[in-house]
Image (tube, grey):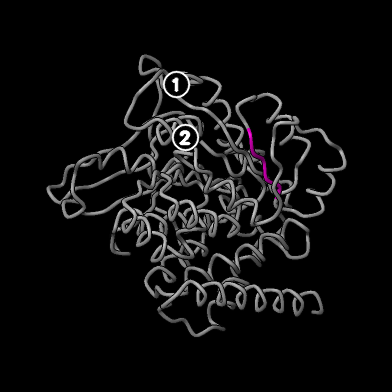
Amino acid sequence: MVLLGATGSIGESALRVIAEHPEHLELIGVAARANHAQLAAIAQAHPSVRHAAIFDEASYAAARSAQNFPAHVNLHAGLEGLIALATLAEADIVLVAVVGVTGLEPALAAIAAGKDLALASKEILVMAGKFVMAAAREKGITLRPVDSEHNAVAQCLADNPTKDVARVVLTASGGAFRDRSLAELAHVRPADALRHPNWEMGPKITVDSATLANKGLELIEARWLFDLRPEQCQAVLHTQSLAHCIVEFTDGAMLTHLCPPSMTFPIQHALLHPLRFPSVEPGLDVHKPFSLDFRPIDQARFPMLRLAFESMHTGGTAPAVYNAANEIAVEAFLAEQIPFLAIPTVVEKTLTALDHQDPSDLATVLAFDSEARRVARSLLSAHAKS
């Protein structure tokens, strides 16, 4: 297997799964955006790694200078390096866990090369679900969801045909601010947003969890993964993060999927399916008390979820614009350039500023992504001046 995004939180969990099941998983390629020292340490700890890629050119140069990778490891650079790893002849499956749109072209290249894809980068389907799913169908590729919610849906669906599904409900923890009032949210800082009560994740996804943009992106992704209509994709608050989805069928029956809030569970399922082996961490102990609470989500309190629903119903390039504007806004919030409550404002104004269309090719999607980022940055500049 190849692991793109080896130094992030998903990568760290994947490495734990690989270490637990070395007789079934052989790591041959690893990639990171910039952390070359940590990537080199991973290559040293896994002698089977023969290829490594560093996306950031300056970090690649620093790695070449440091010479801390084992001598047998071929070092690749930039987007071309990620694509080279995603298409290695000896690879059976590629786990894409890079943040943002960087993983799109490597994912498509892996599909074109006939590799099974374990997908943790939700932006890929949010931006280009139409093209990614079509490419996977054409090549007969198995696309294995790694997000805990989508992996849970896949397990609940199993052999049930999509036509028998009434709706898919994804659960949301509510993030760091789920118990804060709107008045309190006006004064929160990035450090506050990064204190997630249930999960350990990277900064961007942790902020997205607090705004519920993460759930919005997951709903758009679910629409493509499971061939659903927008109205079939719903979400509820579930603060315990033990139930990861609810699938309701047309006969009224519901299935849910339970496991502790650790990414090792969905990653192991995605990498080893259809085989089942002992998990890295213990599962739920049903002999000890625990509760499952579900609550409706107030979209006025979480406007990013409302905007996601609107983008999904608009379709075409709207989800790509939603994703791009959110990335720019979250980046600005983390840099303390805008307040937390300005994130949905930037996203909504960016969505309104562009005339969306049904893209006929990937180039159109990428053009809208680029224009959305330009518009969002101009809104940030206007905010700074005011």
- Residue 228 is left or right of residue 252, and the answer is right
Residue 41 on image: x %, y %: 73, 29
Residue 9 on image: x %, y %: 62, 38
Residue 372 versus residue 7 in the image, above or below: below
Secondary structure type for disc 1: loop
**Image quarter for residue 290?**
top left
Instruction: Indicate the amino acid at tag 1.
Output: Ser
Q: Name the residue at 41% across, 75% down.
A: 316
Q: Name the residue at 68% across, 24% down.
A: 45
Point out the image quarter for the C terminus.
bottom right
Instruction: Indicate the amino acid at tag 2.
Output: Ile
Q: Are marks 1 and 2 in contact (CB under 8 Å)?
A: no
Label number found at residue 279: 1
- Residue 104 is left or right of residue 37, and the answer is left
What secondary structure predominates along the stretch shown in magenta?
A: strand
Counting other residues with Cα less than 10 Å from the Cα at mark 1, is it few (<14), some (14-19), or many (20 or more)?
some
Residue 73 versus residue 216 in the image, above or below: above
